[in-house]
């Protein structure tokens, strides 16, 4: 098993209610034929982001420990030594490398391999995606949304919660005016609001017909999220409220709490699943299937990963039947990357590489 540290910069830093993301650092993980059960080489990526995963140093220690623990190549249970709750990014790195190797060994794309392992049908050839628009002033936000729609996106996700609610309402109103009624708009507050602010936000945003509000409350507040959904159900039952209100998506909550707890609490209409935060592509796809079975819509995104993990997330999304638009159109946010992007975007959809593994020979030479 080989580890190579990397760092990639964002061309345009992403401003969120939790601060600015300007750089992504992590490790490429290479496994050789003979590691695990596989006869093929494999490639993975571990790109931690505190708030969603362990720290960079915890990720590095966990990966080094597994690497240095085996003299004769990785044994089959190496993955079991990486705890998905403690070091999800480290586990993602190795799980992806082993899954890539296994798909290559079978001459399949990673999506096809994952789908087969989960008893799912043949994966999609393309994945619908949202454009990602960071926090910016009203004009900048509307301009970014307009550009995205001109590029063919039918769904735009806008960061909110970094400004006073008045400003965010104005920003989203400007976006709705700019893109018209046919484009889906999502707003991501990254946990910035308290319950009273979130209630006010949902009321004031209702006329804008948003597809959902993501993580309106702090990650641990499942009861609050359930209460926001209950407010809506009450309104619908009473026939009151002139506008249909807004579905709730949870993101950080999934990094903090088990999916089962989120489903049990009736806290979400949509779950935002980041393979890096959940401990691997295998675990992300299992979570998507569990959510679906509970009537909750999965959306696959990344923590703005580099090309290897981003491509893996595209394969996960492709394996989810009829997946909703996913937050995977982030290649253009990076000013450099580990390799050319193998998932061209057109008309708001990404093309899924047909393999074998992650992307055929596109990543040969890495790590
Ligand atoms: O979902 C997207 O459009 C892109 C991913 C994204 O927004 C994001 C990127 C890095 C860290 C956190 C988040 C988030 O969804 O909150
Ligand atoms: Mg989010």
Image: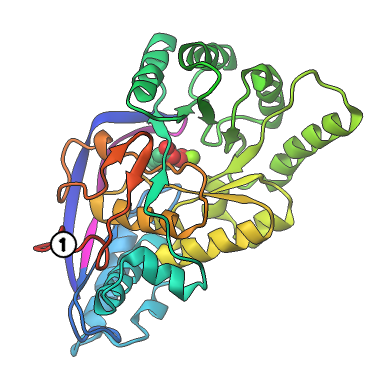
For the N terminus, the image quarter is: bottom left
The residue to which callout 1 is attached is 4
Q: Is residue 87 visible?
A: no
Task: Say left or right for 124 vs 220.
Answer: left
| 23 drawn magenta | yes
Residue 37 higher or lower than 286, as above or below: below
Residue 298 higher or lower than 134, as above or below: below
Which residue extends farthest left? Answer: 365
Classified by dominant secondary structure, the portion drawn in magenta counts as strand
> What residue is rendered at 45% in x and 47% in y?
51
Which residue extends farthest bottom? Answer: 72
SS label for mark 1: strand
Task: Say left or right for 72 vs 186.
Answer: left
Q: Which residues are magenta?
A: 17-29
Task: Say left or right for 14 vs 165.
Answer: left
Count of marks, rendered view: 1
Which residue extends farthest right? Answer: 238
Q: Work out whether residue 25 or residue 362 is closer to the camera in this orientation and state it.
A: 362
Report x, y in % for residue 145: 40, 20
Report x, y in % for residue 251: 53, 45
Disc 1 crowd, CA 10 A, few/some/many (<14, 14-19, 20+): few
- Quarter of image, res 308: bottom left
């Amino acid at each position: 098993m080989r580890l190579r540290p990397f760092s990639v910069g964002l061309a345009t830093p992403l401003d969120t209610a939790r601060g600015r993301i300007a750089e992504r650092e992590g490790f490429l993980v290479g496994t050789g034929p003979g590691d695990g059960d596989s006869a093929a080489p494999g490639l993975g990526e571990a790109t931690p982001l505190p708030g969603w995963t362990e720290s960079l140093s915890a990720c590095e220690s966990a990966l080094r420990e597994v690497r240095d623990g085996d003299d004769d190549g990785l044994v089959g249970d190496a993955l079991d030594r990486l705890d998905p709750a403690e070091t999800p990014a480290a586990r993602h790195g190795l799980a992806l490398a082993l899954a890539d190797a296994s798909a290559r060994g079978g001459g399949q794309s990673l999506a096809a391999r994952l789908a087969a392992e989960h008893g799912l049908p043949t994966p999609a050839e393309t994945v619908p995606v949202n454009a990602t628009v960071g926090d910016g002033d009203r004009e900048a936000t509307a301009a970014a949304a307009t550009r995205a729609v001109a590029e063919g996106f039918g769904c735009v996700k806008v960061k909110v919660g970094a400004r006073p609610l008045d400003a965010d309402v104005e920003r989203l109103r400007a976006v709705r005016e700019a893109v018209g009624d046919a484009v889906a708009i999502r707003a991501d507050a990254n946990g910035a609001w308290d319950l009273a602010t979130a209630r006010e936000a949902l009321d004031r945003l209702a006329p804008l017909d948003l597809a959902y509000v993501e993580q309106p409350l702090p990650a641990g507040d499942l009861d609050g999220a359930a209460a926001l959904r209950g407010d809506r159900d009450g309104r619908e039952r009473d026939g009151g409220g002139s506008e249909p209100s807004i579905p709730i998506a949870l993101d950080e909550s999934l990094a903090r709490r088990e999916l089962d707890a989120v489903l049990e609490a009736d806290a979400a209409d949509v779950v935002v699943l980041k393979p890096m935060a959940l401990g691997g592509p295998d675990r992300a796809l299992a979570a998507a299937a569990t959510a679906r079975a509970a009537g909750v819509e999965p959306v696959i995104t990344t923590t703005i990963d580099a090309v290897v993990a981003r491509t893996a997330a595209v394969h996960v999304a492709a394996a989810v039947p009829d997946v909703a638009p996913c937050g995977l159109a982030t290649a253009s946010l990076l000013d450099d990357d580990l390799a050319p992007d193998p998932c061209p975007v057109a008309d708001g959809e990404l093309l899924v590489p047909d393999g074998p593994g992650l992307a055929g020979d596109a990543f040969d030479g890495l790590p």
